[in-house]
Image (spheres, grey):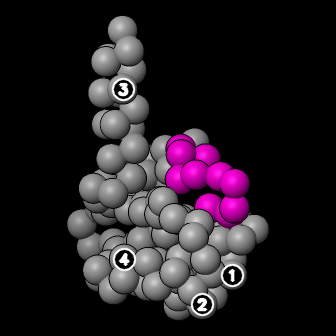
Amino acid sequence: MITTKLIALTLLCSTAWVATPVVAAGASTKPTIVLVHGAFAGSSSWNADITDLEADGYRVVALANPSRSLATDAQYVARILTSIAGTVEFVRHSYGGEVIAMAA
């Protein structure tokens, strides 16, 4: 039972990294939405939002902010941002706003 839940959770969390948008032929490509959580939270706090955004055809990346220091966290986020092609839009919560401002 625990193994089944762990596998389900792993699959749920991994979809945020590999999901691709569903775009109709001739339509413009939607931006990648990058979600950055605040302090004392985790990327799983975005699960409901990820589901909704992916259902609307967005590619979503929910970063697991390491919460070590502002500089370290911003460097981590900046490294991930360089791997994302195309337009990126940020959604941040609390401390995540400082992190993304410094990373961008």
For disc 3, the marked residue is: 6
Q: Mark 1 is on which residue type? A: Glu
Q: Is the Cβ of the residue at disc 4 closer than 8 Å to that at disc 2?
A: no
Q: Which residue is drawn at 47% across and 63% down?
A: 63
Q: How many marks?
A: 4
Q: Viewer-proximal residue, 82 or 42?
A: 42
Which label's residue is closer to the chain start, 4 or 1? 4
Question: Which of marks 2 and 4 precedes in the sequence?
Answer: 4
Image position, residue 56 (x, y; %): 47, 53
Q: Distance between the residues labelled 3 and 1?
A: 32 Å
State the CA–CA distance, disc 1 to disc 2: 6 Å
Question: How much space separates mark 4 and mark 2, taking CA atoms?
Answer: 13 Å
Q: Name the residue under label 1.
A: 98
Residue 102: assigned label: 2
Residue 62, which numbered label? Answer: none
Question: Which mark is first along the chain, 3 or 4?
Answer: 3
Q: Which of 64 and 21 is in front in this view?
A: 64
Quadrant (top left/top right/bottom left/bottom right) for the N terminus: top left
Residue drawn at 43 percent across, 61 percent down: 60
Give the extent of the magenta segment. 37-47
What residue does disc 4 label? 80
Q: Is residue 33 left or right of residue 100?
A: left
Tag 1 near tag 2, CB within 8 Å: yes
The amino acid type, in three-letter code, at marker 3 is Leu
At x 31% / y 37%, what residue is drawn?
11
When the figure is inspected, residue 92 is found, relative to residue 100, above or below; the finding is above
Do residues under tags 4 and 1 come within 8 Å of each other at their CB atoms?
Answer: no
Q: Which amino acid does label 4 sit on?
A: Ile
Residue 67 image position (x, y, % from top left): 59, 66
Alpha carbons under labels 2 and 3: distance apart: 34 Å
Camera-side residue of 32 and 76: 76
